[in-house]
Image (cartoon, coloured by chain):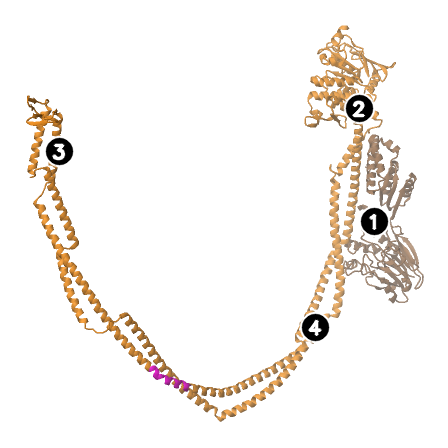
Amino acid sequence: MPRILHTADWQMGRYYSRFDNDDAVALAEARFTAIERLAQLARDERCDAVLVAGDVFDAQTVADRTIRRVFNAMSGFSGPWVMLPGNHDAALAESVWTRARRLNAVPDNVHLALEPGVVDLKAQGLAVLAAPLTQRHTHSDLTENFDHLETSPELLRVGLAHGSVQGLLAEDIDSANPIAADRAAQANLDYLALGDWHGVKQINARTWYSGTPEPERFRNNEAGVALVVDIAGPGAEPDVSRHRIGQFEWVQWREHLSVATDLDELLQRLEELPAPAVVDIRLSGEVDLAGEQKLLHALSVAEARHRSVQCDRSQLALQPTDEDIAELNADGYLGEVIGELREQQENADDEKAATSRDALAILTSLLRDRIEPASGNAGEGQP
Amino acid sequence: MKLQRLRLEQLRQFRQPLELNELGPGLNLIHGPNESGKSTLVRAIRAAFFERHRSSSVDDLRPWGDSSAAPSVELDFECQGVQWQLRKRFLQQKRCDLQVAGESYSGEEAEDKLADLLGFQFAPRGASQDKHWGIPGLLWVEQGSGQNVHDAVAYAGDHLKSALNSLLGEVASSGGDDVIQQVQAQRAELLTATGKPRGDYARLSEEQSQLAAELEALDERVAHYQSMVDRLGELRQRHQRNEQERPWEAARQSQQEAENRFREIEQWQQEQKREQQALDDCRQTLELLRRQQQQSQVAARKLNEREQTLAHCKETVNTLKTREEQVTVAQQQARKAYDKARQQVRVAKEQEQCNRLDNDIKQLRLQLETLGKNLEKARAHQAEHQETRNQQQANPLDLEALEALRKTQRQLEQERIRSQAIATRLHYALESGQALTLNGQSLQGEGDELLLEATTLALPGIGELTITPGGDDLARVQRQLERLQESYDNQLKSMKVDSPEQAGKLAEQQAQRKETIQRLEALLASIAPQGVDVLESQQQEFTRRLEQLQSEQKALSEIPGEPLSLTSAEAALDMAEQQLREADGKLQEHSKQLFAATQALENAQAEWQQLKRELENPERQAAEQSLQTQIAEAGERETRLQQSVGKRQEQIDEARPELLQQDMARFKASAEQLERSHQQEALELASLESKLESQGAEGLEEQREEMAARLEHVVRRYTELRRRAEALDLLLTLLQEKRKALTRRLQAPLQKHLNHYLGVLFPKANLDVDDNLIPGQLTRAGQQGQETGDVLDLSFGAREQMGLISRLAYADLLQEAGRPTLIILDDTLVHSDRQRLDQMKRILFDAASRHQVLLFTCHPENWQDLGVAPRDLEALKTTD
């Protein structure tokens, strides 16, 4: 009763430009850890083989060190690994794979499925039908070949492919590298392990996307798992279980603040968010000075708890209340300036509105510093 | 605020109490000479308000040398509708008591209440200074400081502004200027004054474009790398296919086939060449044979020609022979004519010589005759010449002696005339018929006589008169006369002449003869230049010659015949000679022709004979026959060969050997090219592989990702800074705008009051006030239209006037804001001229209708026309 670990889309060598350097390095590092965890999982779960359904590498020309580290990280599982080239690491005439071989980085237990065909794992009772990408993009269904590939009847027929299942995924997703939805049935496969879709997704009883083991996008599509697939024997329906691998949850919130309780609710959620996570908040609406103070404080706390907290407040207008203004002692023309800036925040031109908002923040912060020069933990009022 | 009463005691020079009461609500003029205490009064008022009663820094209030004095001031005034009374004592028993509308305050409380009311501060320590004085500092003008309004306004600034704020019913920002400064400072970190990025902001902008460029370069390299990978895949596929298919071998096969076909055609061509050669040979033979045949035909034609030539030669000889006699006769005739012409010429020549001799003889005879005549003449002349010469020599006359004679004669004459001049003149006029006798000479009629010596006049009938002339001279003259006469006579004798006239005649003859001799000699020279003897020998010579010629003539005269012209005879001879020459030529030519013709005839005869024999030879006729047959055979063969060659050529042309050759080259080149490119592909493959290997090791895309991340960071940071810069810019602009707007609002009332006064001095002038309400630019009508300048640049007097105007304007402003105003002027406007002072008085009078004004002066006469009674300080002192 063979047991397979199905994973895909490691995207090794990806660099996270949207984060500060520290966070980016840590997130890249987390992907190596994910491989180690996969190997650990395979050993713990006594899997017979690990199938990686494409996009192991994010690019063809990654550093030698990255290549070596990837294979080193796999050392925790000594059983067979079958690795399939995807669109990011297609098996071109010269590819990351040919380089890995030249570097002698590929251990013996790792099978590189660089050409279409069958990888026989007799000892494990598996025949892996591989449909590697040999071009960056193809517009024909490479798995069509599976229909004609003969395998020993005593071996399980397991397909390994990378691409978009036709008709199931959203239409707007690039339909390069198409895969027929009923390929498993047509090619008489026991299981079809797919890669390219970064969240875990079941297409049918025998066809699954495993998603990436460590999330790297904010799209909420259940990323960060690997699939353990049990198949009783040829023709038996596979039993698929999800196992968490990822370290960081990626959270993205778009919130509109209009009343004070909106902010309270947001801060509550932020407080309850399990750490460590990668957080991206984008706020719109308006907030008074006290609210802004509270928000900045909560963000500061969250930054310390989580891997990365980014908050875009450019659409969030600062609306000091009359009490705020009185408290700031903004008499005379300072009061007029505050009033004018408040009005300008409503400008139809986003750019101008944002500038007014920033200007208002600077002014209020200056005024606050005048009242209480010692307690300036709100920073310099920078956006 | 209206000051009503002022009392001071033990204060400076007022040791005794001095009270100034019943002060009017408007203008109060207090005068007194220098050191009468005007400034002390002012000082007392200041001290009452500004100095803490406890202050120990007010020693100056104490009268000189009175250390125990307790200077005190009492002031009664009305303000804000209530009555105020202030009593203050310094240095000793210090006190301050203030009663306001019945309520009492004392000490510092009282003092602070006053400070609040008037708008000033107390000095934290020491004596009060102008910077503490606030609004009173502005309105209470010390002696000599009227022009300096700037400091006073600055010190009163806050009070003024708060007064203005209350006036406008709104709040000026309390910390606005600080905020502006902070914003400015923060903006300056990012932007230059002109709004250009600086510092980090500028650096990030540069870094951003630099990184973008690097990223682009990396992108390019990645794209290049990817294209190389594609190329590698493509090449590898093609290389493998070619390795299997080996297309160059197919090309080689085609080349071989083309070559084989070409060889075949080459064989055809060689055969063709051979047969063509045979055809050519055949044609040549045929040509040869035909030429031979033609030659035999030519021989027959030649015989015919030679026959004709022979006949022609015979005819020529005959013709020439018939002409021979004619030519010979003509030659003989010409010879005869020539001989005759020669004879004629000889005769003509002889005749001509004979004529010439004749002429010579005639001429010689003529010459001989002339010579004879000349000889005769010469001989005659020679004889005459000899005779004349002889005569000349026989009668010589001395010409000098003749001259001397004539001289002597002239002297004698002159002496005679002189003697007559000195002689006694005797005039007589006798009646007719009467006569006298003088020295025996009878005188009749009328006349004169000169008497040189004693003369006797005989008067007939009467007797005689002897007249003796007087004087010595007469005697001496007489003697001279006698001597000259003697010499004269002697000379005549020696010359053998009787008189000088005769001697002249003789001299004349002698000259004539001389002339004759000369003439004869000339004649002789012309006729016989070489002498008469030569003429004679010439005559003999000519005679002899004549005889010779005559004998020659005699010898010639025997030649007979007609007289002939030599010229025509010679012409006839020339003609005859020419004709003879021609006739000789013709004869000779004819002989030559005849000879040649005879010769030709013989040759023609021989040739004809020879050819005829040859043609009639039988061997030759047989040969001709055989030639004919040979020609027929060769013609047949030629036709056959020609057909064969034509046919084969068609075959060859159809096969297109040149195209076959091209095919061969083409296939060969293709094969080579294919193989070579296959090898090159192998090389390129190897090179690409190694390039990709080395570039792959660089981790280009990972580098690119990193670079993109760096760029994104920079862009993010730059955007932040940009937003901040824009925000700061906006904030600063807004703050400054609002502040300016506020200032303008604040300035408006002050401006109004200023212009109210200013108009009196300078119609339509305008005085700007700056943000701090300090007068700045003055604009007024000048000589060249509007002129603008800083108040500080005005003359001292004008500045003082402006200062006063400003202070009055501030007072109006303060009063409007409900603040107390009291104006104290200590000896002001001393630098103004009469005209300006008059205007200033109008201004002051106007101001005094709203404010109480205390004016201290030592020139009361300047202020007489202010409509108030001046108060004399000296008088006040004495009333006490």
Q: Which residue is mark 4?
A: B252
Q: Residues within 10 Å of mark 4 (few under 14, many from 20)?
A: some
Chain on which label 4 sits: B
* B191 relative to B131, above or below: below
Chain on which label 3 sits: B
Q: Quadrant of residue B776?
A: top right
| The residue positioned farthest toward the bottom in the image shown | B618
Residue B808 lies left or right of residue B665; in this view the side is right
Q: Residue sitting at 52 percent across and 90 percent down?
A: B624
**Residue B592: x %, y % from top left:** 36, 82
Q: Is residue B699 visible?
A: no
The colour assigned to chain A within the rendered structure: brown
Q: Is residue B632 visible?
A: yes
**Front position among marks 4 and 1:** 4
Tell me, yes or no, whether dots 4 and 3 are on the same chain: yes
* A78 relative to B604, above or below: above
Q: Quadrant of residue B540?
A: bottom left
Tell me, yes or no, whether dots 3 and 1 are on the same chain: no
Tell me which amino acid carries mark 2. Leu
